[in-house]
């Protein structure tokens, strides 16, 4: 039985991971969880899962209250607490469903302690892909992706000769504004942006889908996960979101992974180490679906993908600058501080003005992340004053 430490237990991926664990109790035991601020959801987990003996929260005040209320659970708090949670719970598998840069250090810590990692946190590979790959080489740990696109690629590449592969094709819905022109994007609202046409996700990833920054991140992830050149990884717009990725071979034939829009499928694939598991999900009815539609990705319509490609090709801490400025700008948009198109403008500005460190250490990446956030917030405040 695998002992699971679940980081980000109250988010969308976290909740669906718990659903799989609960339905497969002979295979998994949930022993440790983390939560940022949704304490009510955390308490529901603690009250229904007596196997959970360790928990981490973001704020010290929540830590102090909870440790008195649940004396059979060992609590931790803050970023340091996430690492203590992993270390003390001694899990078989860490599922990293954290959102943003906060997931990078726990990913690196997990692998450095010879613990397998199921990864939904895109930023771990975006900002520290080389470091993560180096850790996998020197430690007795494995990485299993959770993103539906990367699980689809893993399935299509299984037992295939790499020399026969021409390209990896990651599909994209195009996000909430896929049918709008650049001109029509000027005054879109947060509510409109959060209305995704295909998936139900958290607010950050939904906005990243609207700007297509998430596809830029996924290209970087695919490069590190499958060791293909960045120029071999393509993006294809696909309205129905039932083809999750494709592989094109040198004979110009394609192999695609089709399935329901249900994240429990890739989560289970990761938990079961790349093996398929029968799940209680609604089957994809191809007869009802009827047809599939594809559109060419337009780099001018979605410049954030280009920013991601520029960042990974330049390397160093530029991907960290990309990620940190994107996080701050996205949350500023969600909070009504800037307009939608200003997300792109701010990212581009930060990438052009902040100094890059070549061959960064983990400490360099952490410092770059902090500096980028400070400068990005200053730019956001400047724009607010000018309005």
Image (tube, rainbow, N blue to C red):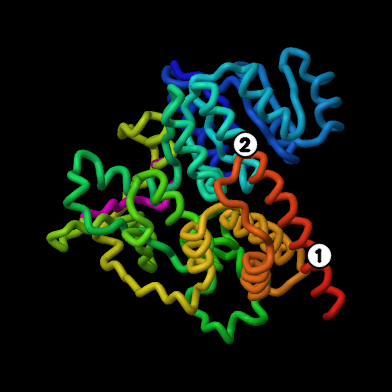
* Residue numbers of the magenta segment: 255-265
Q: Residue 368 location, x and y as percent?
A: 68, 51
Please tell me the numbered disc located at residue 378.
Answer: 1
Q: Locate residue 379: give its quadrant.
A: bottom right
Give the position of the N terminus as an image quadrant. Answer: top left
**Of 260 and 203, the residue lying toward us:** 203
Between residues 274 and 202, which one lies in front from this camera angle?
Answer: 274
Label 1 – label 2 distance at C-alpha: 25 Å
Q: Depth check: give the residue in front, 259 or 273.
A: 273
Is 326 situated above or below 111? below
**Residue at left offset 75%, top offset 40%:** 37
Residue that numbered label 2 is attached to = 105
The quarter holding residue 55 reads top right
**Residue 311 visible:** yes
Where residue 211 appears, as percent x and y from the top left, is 55, 68
Relative to 374, does residue 121 appear above or below in the rendering? above
Pointer 1 and pointer 2: residues touching (CB < 8 Å)?
A: no
From the top left corner, tell me how far across and down residue 327 is, in percent. Answer: 66, 57
SS category of the residue bearing label 1: helix
């Amino acid at each position: 039985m695998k002992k699971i430490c679940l980081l980000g237990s109250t988010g969308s991926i976290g909740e669906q991971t718990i659903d799989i664990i609960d339905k497969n109790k002979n295979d998994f035991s949930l022993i440790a969880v983390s939560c940022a601020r949704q304490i009510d959801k955390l308490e529901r987990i603690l009250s229904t899962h007596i196997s959970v003996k360790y928990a981490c929260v973001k704020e010290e005040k929540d830590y102090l209250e909870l440790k008195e209320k649940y004396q059979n659970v060992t609590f931790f708090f803050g970023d340091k607490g996430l690492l203590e949670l992993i270390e003390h719970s001694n899990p078989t598998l860490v599922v990293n469903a954290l959102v943003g840069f906060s997931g990078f250090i726990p990913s690196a810590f997990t692998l450095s302690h010879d613990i397998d990692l199921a990864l939904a946190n895109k930023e771990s590979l975006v900002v520290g892909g080389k470091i993560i790959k180096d850790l996998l080489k020197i430690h007795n740990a494995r990485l299993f992706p959770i993103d539906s696109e990367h699980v689809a690629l893993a399935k299509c590449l299984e037992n295939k000769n790499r020399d026969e592969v021409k390209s990896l094709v990651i599909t994209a819905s195009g996000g909430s504004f896929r049918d709008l022109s650049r001109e029509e994007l000027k005054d879109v609202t947060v509510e409109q942006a959060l209305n995704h046409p295909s998936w139900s996700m958290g607010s950050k990833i939904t906005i990243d889908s609207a700007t297509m920054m998430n596809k830029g991140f996924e290209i970087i992830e695919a490069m590190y996960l499958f060791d293909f050149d960045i120029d071999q990884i393509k993006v294809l717009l696909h309205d129905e979101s039932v083809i999750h990725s494709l592989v094109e071979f040198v004979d110009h034939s394609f192999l695609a992974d089709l399935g329901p829009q249900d994240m429990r499928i890739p989560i289970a694939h990761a938990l079961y180490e790349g093996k398929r598991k029968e799940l209680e999900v609604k089957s994809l009815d191809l007869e009802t679906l009827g047809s599939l539609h594809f559109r060419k990705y337009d780099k001018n319509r979605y410049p954030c993908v280009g920013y991601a490609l520029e960042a990974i090709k330049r390397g160093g801490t530029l991907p960290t600058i990309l990620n940190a400025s994107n996080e701050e700008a996205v949350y500023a948009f969600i909070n009504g501080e800037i307009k939608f198109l200003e997300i792109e403008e701010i990212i581009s500005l930060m990438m052009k003005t902040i100094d890059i460190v070549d061959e960064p250490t983990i400490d360099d990446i952490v410092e770059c992340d902090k500096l980028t956030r400070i400068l990005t917030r200053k730019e956001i405040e400047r724009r607010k004053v000018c309005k």
